[in-house]
Amino acid sequence: LLELRYTIPGDARRLELPDFQQEPAVQRVYLCVYLPHEDALLGSTGPWTEQFDWRMEKLNWIPVPRAGESSLLSWVAEDVPETGNPLDSFQTDGRLYVFSTLRPAPPPDGVLRMTTVDQTWLGAIVFGVVILGGVFLLPFGTSTRASAVGSLIVALVLCGVFLPTFALQVLDGVLASAISVVFVLWIVRFFVKTWPTLQWKRPPIVSQPTAQVVAVAVETPEESAAPQQQPEADTDEGGAHDE
C-alpha cells in the first residue's frame, strides 16, 4: 500500500491526479474533496461521477457521501497488514464531497473542475433578487403577480433538470424566507390600498314597473254596418211636422 501526498498550484476548483508515465493498472479511483463550510458547490465538470446524495437538514441541503473516507481506506487496504490509519496524520476540515471515475485520463482530460461560491454571498444574492422582484410587482395586479410566480417555478424546475446541484443550493431556507417576506408585503398592500376601495354594500333593489291597464275602444264590423239612430227632435205640444 503506497500513500502519496502532493500539492498542486492554485485553489481547489481544479483537482489533478498524478500522472504515472509507466501506466500502472489503475481501475476505479475515488476522490474525496473537502470544501470549507462557508463555500457552496454549484456544480462540477470532468469525467467524474458524484458519489454522494443530498439530505435536507434545517431547510438546507447537505451532501451525504455514500462511502466515507474510512470505509474507502479500508477497501483499499483490504489485503494489506494494518500499519495505522493514514487519516490520523492527514487532518481535514470542511464538508466532504466524494467523486469516482474509471481509469482517469492524465491532465487536462481527467481534471475535476468544481464551481464554488461563498455561501453568504449566494444567500444575499438570492434574498435580494426575490425581495426586489416582489417590490417591483407591488403596483401590478393579481394576474401579473401570478404570472411572475409561475415563471419563477418554471425557472427552478429547469434548473433542477439541467443544473441540479445549483438548484439544490438555491432551494434552501434563504429562498423560503425571501418568498415569505414578499407574500407579507403583498398582503399588507392589499389591505392598505385595495381593501378600502372595494364596495361591500348590498346592491340596490330595483323596483319592478307596475302594470298599467289601458282601455282601448275597438269598433267591430257589425257595429260599423248597423244604421245609426237619429235622435228625435223635441216638439212642443200642439205643434205639427211638415213633410
Image (tube, grey):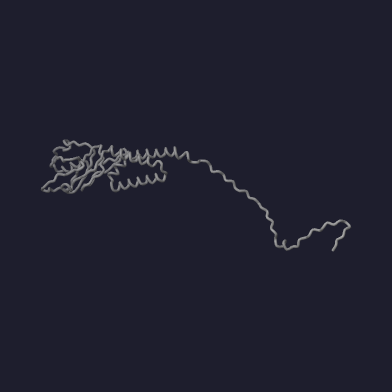
Total numbered labels: 0
Q: Residue at x 13, y 38 (%)?
A: 83
Asked which quadrant contains residue 39, the reply is top left
Q: Is residue 189 left or right of residue 91?
A: right
Viewer-side residue, 116 vs 63: 116
Q: Residue furthest right?
A: 238
The furthest residue to the front? 242
Q: State the quadrant of the N terminus.
A: top left
Nearest to the observer: residue 20 or residue 238 = 238
**Is 75 positioned to the left or the right of 163 in the image?**
left
Q: Where residue 170 appears, x then y in whole percent?
A: 30, 42
Q: Residue 147, percent across and down?
A: 38, 46
Q: Quick one: 86 or 198, which is closer to the camera?
A: 198
User: At 64% from the left edge and 50% from the top edge, which residue is drawn?
Assistant: 212
Which of 237/67 is in front? 237
Residue 179 image offset from top left, x and y in percent? 36, 40
Tell whether 147 sits left or right of 101: right
Quadrant location, the C terminus:
bottom right
Q: Position of residue 242 (x, y in %)?
A: 85, 62
